[in-house]
Amino acid sequence: MTTAMTKQNVDMEKIRERLQGAGGKIVLGIDGYIDSVWQILASRTGPEEYELYERMSNFSKTLSGCEEGGFSNEIIRKRRSYGGFTANTGKALTGLGVDLSMVGMFGKSSIDPVFEVFSGVGEFVSVGDPGLVTIYEFTDGKIMFVYTEEIMGFNWEAMTGTLDENRIKGIYSAADIIGLGYWSLMPAFDEIVTKICGLMKDNQKKQRIFFDFADIRKRDRESLESTLALLFSLNMQIPMTLSLNEHEAALLFSYYGETIAQEGEGAAAQTEKIRKTIGIDELVVHTPYFSTAASEYEGRCAAPQNYCTSPVITVGAGDHFNGGYMAAALKGLDIEERLTVGNAVTSLYISRGKSPSMQELLAELEINY
């Protein structure tokens, strides 16, 4: 179920024409995860009769009442699936017909079956074994426990041990947009970004790198600021876009004395201020209620989200926003149009539990945006 919102004044003819037009390539990397998604039972009255903890806040209250004891309860499996930035964003983009390459950690000796859904992707390259994620999903959020041994040890040496530098250069040089995630779970992220940019320093193609850092609380402020300084130094070579969800934005903004506004226009002004402070080309923030962006050349913008009160799925929602936003950027849509497309892809995904097709996206934009 979604709530009503005011339709935006977007040029649907332009969006339709651009999104369905040919041209452009996106390369995603470099993570890979297998998600085991569970739900937690609140009570059971029979073999098929039970109630779930629907809201994370209710489960939290139960858990906090066990401070000096233990907690034991039943869980049921919801699904086992691919996960992480590369796969979730890739699924959003394949539904939209984007020319796509994926470089990630999908399995060393063989590709894990959960990634077989990407068999139609033109270039699908594995550089290691995936991480493992245990997820407890609620209607208002999720609890995630991530096992990252393989990804924690991944660095440039490991990558070039699987692919030689000429192959890597060929893959990334062909891209118009390069999407990279997740900084917070990969200690060698800065090294990898620097090396990729180094391979492309003489590339004459106009390119952009799009980042999803994931939960920045996992790393200290010094590490974050070091990475932001690196992106600032590389931004003159290749324009950089950083995408944050509301929690990540709240923490980053707090480092610079800002409490993120609860409405779009105020948050957009803050997004513009923080973008100028960190010095990259573009900063994007997406929340369940609105999204904002600030660009060096397009200024700032806010776009309302069609808020979903009863989501079918929440895992991967941010990645689907990123996929929609990148697809719109690839096709040359403006800042408001990019936010609108990202919002619509997210809304369809969380309310229906699957990545939308191009026709489904266009219909959603026509009706609700």
Image (tube, helix red, strand yellow):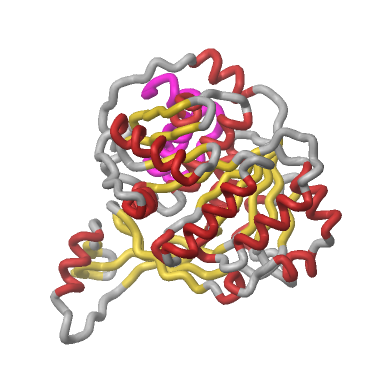
Q: Residue at x 46, y 39 (%)?
A: 276
Q: In this view, does 74 lie above or below 50?
A: below
Q: Please indicate, yes or no, whether residue 126 appears anywhere in the rendered image.
A: yes
The magenta segment is 341-369
Q: Quadrant of residue 187?
A: bottom right
Q: Residue furthest bottom?
A: 69
Residue 54 in picture, x, y percent from top left? 24, 57
Q: Quadrant of residue 366?
A: top left
Residue 300 forms part of the magenta stretch = no
Q: Residue furthest left?
A: 65
Q: Residue at x 48, y 46 (%)?
A: 278
Q: In this view, does 359 lie above or below 215?
A: above
Q: In this view, does 164 lie above or below 98?
A: below
Residue in front for this viewpoint, 135 or 251: 251
Q: Residue at x 47, y 35 (%)?
A: 342
Q: Quadrant of residue 332?
A: top right
Q: Please indicate, yes or no, whether residue 324 appears anywhere in the rendered image.
A: no
Q: Main secondary structure of the magenta part?
A: helix
Residue 359 forms part of the magenta stretch = yes
Q: In this view, does 37 lie above or below 101?
A: below
Residue 104 in picture, x, y percent from top left? 66, 59
Residue 290 in picture, x, y percent from top left? 34, 35
Residue in front for this viewpoint, 141 or 77: 141
Q: Is residue 52 found left or right of 217 in the rendered image?
A: left
Classify the position of the N terminus by image quarter. Answer: top left
Q: Residue at x 62, y 66 (%)?
A: 188
Residue 102 in picture, x, y percent from top left? 68, 51
